[in-house]
Image: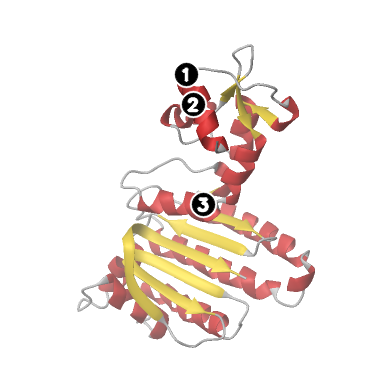
Amino acid sequence: MHRFHFYAILKKYSLTVPYMDESKLLSIGEASKALGVSVDTIRRWDREGKFSSVRSAGGHRYFRKEDVDNFLFDIFGIARKWVTDKDETDIPSNFYCQTSSVFQARLSRFESELGNIPRLKDFFPLISSLAGEIGNNSFDHNIGNWPGMPGIFFGYDVNRGRVVLADRGQGVYKTLKRVRPELSTDQEALHIAFTEIISGRAPESRGNGLKFVRRIVTGNAGLNFIFKAGDATLIIKGGDDGLLIQESETKYHGCFVQLTF
C-alpha cells in the first residue's frame, strides 16, 4: 500500500502510527518554525488535509520531517498556488519579502550561497542580477498600489538550480496599458515588455529591465526562464533568441517567474 494512503487511513479512523521513529518527527511548534507559518496555520492545514499530522501512542500531534522538507523543496508549487488562488493564501515567511529592503537582504544571502557552488563560480553574478531585476520590478511597479497582499515571494534552491519569484500585483498588462492603451491581451503585453523600449514616463520605464533579463537568458545556454502574468506564459530557453508566448493553463494574479540554471 502506498504510504500516503496508509497514513490517510490511519488519520481517518484516528489511529496511531506504529513504531514511530521520533528522531524523524517534529512537534507542531517545530514544524511551525521550520515552515515559517503560525501554529494556527499548521492546524488549519492539518484539518484541510494539506499538511497531515500523525499521532503518537499518547495522542500527541507530530509532523514527519520528510514531509516538511519536501514541502519546502516545492517552491514552484507554493508560489504558483499563492498567485493563482482567487483568495490570498498563507505563504511561509521563509519565502515572503513584504518590503524591498527585506528582499535586498535575502538577495544578498542568495548571491552568497550561489558563490559557494563550484559549478557557478563564474556564472552566479548573472543569476543574482536576474533575480534582483525581477524582484525590483515587482516593487517598482506596485509600490503604493498593491491590489492585494503587498510584497513578493522569493524562494530558491541553489543545489537544485532553481529560483522562483512571484507577486499578487497589478501585472504586466495593467501596467503597460497606461502608455499603450491599444493593448488588448496579456500575450501582447508580455511581448512588448520583453521586446520594446517603453516610454520613459515613470513608472513604466522600470519595465525596460525585462529586456535586460531577456538578453542575459538568451546569451547563456545554462539558463531557462518562464514568466507568467494574467493568462499568458512567456518562455525563453537559454542560448535561444526566440520567445515563446502562449496562453496559460490558469489565471495568474500578478506575476510568476521561474528560473532554472
**Which residue is identified by label 3?**
99
Residue nearer the viewer, 44 or 93? 44
Per the model, the C-alpha gap separating discs 1 and 3 is: 45 Å
- At 47% from the left edge and 18% from the top edge, which residue is drawn? 13
Q: Is residue 15 visible?
A: yes
Note whether 81 is above or below 194 in the view shown: above
Amino acid at pointer 3: Thr
Number of other residues with Cα within 10 Å of mark 1, as a class: few under 14, some 14 to 19, many 20 or more? few
CB atoms of marks 2 and 1 within 8 Å: yes
Q: Quadrant of residue 230?
A: bottom left
Could you tell me residue 195's position as x and y percent?
40, 85
Residue at the extreme bottom of the image, as rendered: 241
Distance CA(mark 2)–CA(mark 1): 6 Å
Task: State the CA–CA distance, disc 2 to disc 3.
Answer: 43 Å
Q: Could you tell me residue 225's position as x and y percent?
A: 51, 72
Give percent across and percent down for residue 178.
Answer: 26, 72
**Any mark on residue 128, and which?**
none
Quadrant of the rendering where the C terminus is positioned: bottom right
Q: Dot 2 corresponds to which residue?
A: 9
Q: Circle 2 sits in a helix, a strand or a loop, which is it?
A: helix
Count of number-bearing discs: 3
**Residue 201 in sight here:** no
Q: Which residue is mark 1?
A: 13
